[in-house]
Image: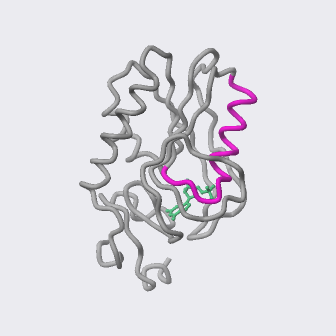
Amino acid sequence: MHDSIQRILLDEATILQRLNTLAAEITDDYRGLDLTVIALLNGSLIFGADLLRRIPLPLQIDGLGISSYEGTESTGQVKFRQTPVAQLQGRHVLLIDDILDTGLTLSTVRDHLVETSGALSVKTCVLLQKDVPRAHWIEADYVGFDIPNEFVVGYGLDYNEKYRNLPYIGILTPEAIAKG
Ligand code: XMP
C-alpha cells in the first residue's frame, strides 16, 4: 500500500500534535453546553476518533453517511446514505469532516441541519482545507491544516474506498491513480 504513495504531506505525529490544540480550542468553546458531534462518514472516521478522545466533555456522537466523490473528482451531488438519529433540538451541533474542498458537502449538510434540526447552533470542523476557490459558500469554524490543491489519501481519506487506513496524509503516485 505504501508503494502507492509518492509523498507524505502530513505525518502521524504532526497530525496528532495539531489535534491536541484543536481539541483544546473546541473544549474551551463548548464547556457547559449540550454538544452533539456529527461525523460525516466514512471520511472523518479516523480524524473523529482521534479528535473526540481529546475532548473531555460529556458530548454525544452521531454519524452521517455521505458521499460526493467518485475516484478523484467531485460528482457535484451530495448523497445522504442515512439521516442522523440523534435528537438535536435545543443542542449545539459540531459537524466534522475530513476535508473542505469545493464546500459542497459541508454546506449541504450544514444548511440541511440548520433548516430541519432545531439545533441552537451548527458549526463545522475539518481536518484539511484545500487551497481552492469554494464553489459553495462556507468557512469552517475549526481547521486542522491548510493544504495545496492536490488529491490526498490516508487518515480516513480514500481513493475508490482504498487507503483510508494509512496513518498519514499522502499523495498517490500517478501509477496508483491510473490503476484505480
Ligand atoms: P467537497 O468538494 O464537497 O468535498 O468540499 C468534500 C468531500 O470530498 C471528498 N474529497 C476528497 N477525498 N481526497 C479524498 O480522498 C481528496 O483530496 C478529496 N477532496 C475531497 C471527501 O470525501 C470530502 O468529504
Tell me if residue 65 is in the magenta stretch: no
Q: Is residue 145 above or below residue 75?
A: above
Residue at 62 percent of width and 38 percent of height: 82
Give the left or right position of residue 55, taking residue 109 as reference: left
Q: Is residue 78 above or below residue 96?
A: below
- Ligand 1: give its quadrant: bottom right
Q: Main secondary structure of the magenta part?
A: helix
Instruction: Point out residue 103 in the picture as x, y percentages from the top left corner.
Output: 65, 53
Q: How is the image coloured?
A: one colour
Instruction: Point out residue 70 in the picture as x, y percentages from the top left corner.
Output: 61, 66
Residue 21, by quadrant, is top left
Residue 146 or residue 94, whichever sits in front: 146
Tell me if residue 103 is in the magenta stretch: yes
Residue 113, by quadrant, is top right
Give the left or right position of residue 113, taking residue 34 as reference: right
- The boundaries of the magenta stretch are 98-117
Residue at 43 percent of width and 80 percent of height: 176
Give the left or right position of residue 162, taking residue 24 as reference: right
Instruction: Point out residue 16 in the picture as x, y percentages from the top left corner.
Output: 28, 48
Q: Is residue 4 above or below residue 108?
A: below
Give the left or right position of residue 6, taking residue 72 as reference: left
Instruction: Point out residue 3 in the picture as x, y percentages from the top left corner.
Output: 30, 78
Residue 64 or residue 169, whichever sits in front: 169
Residue at 48 percent of width and 79 percent of height: 177
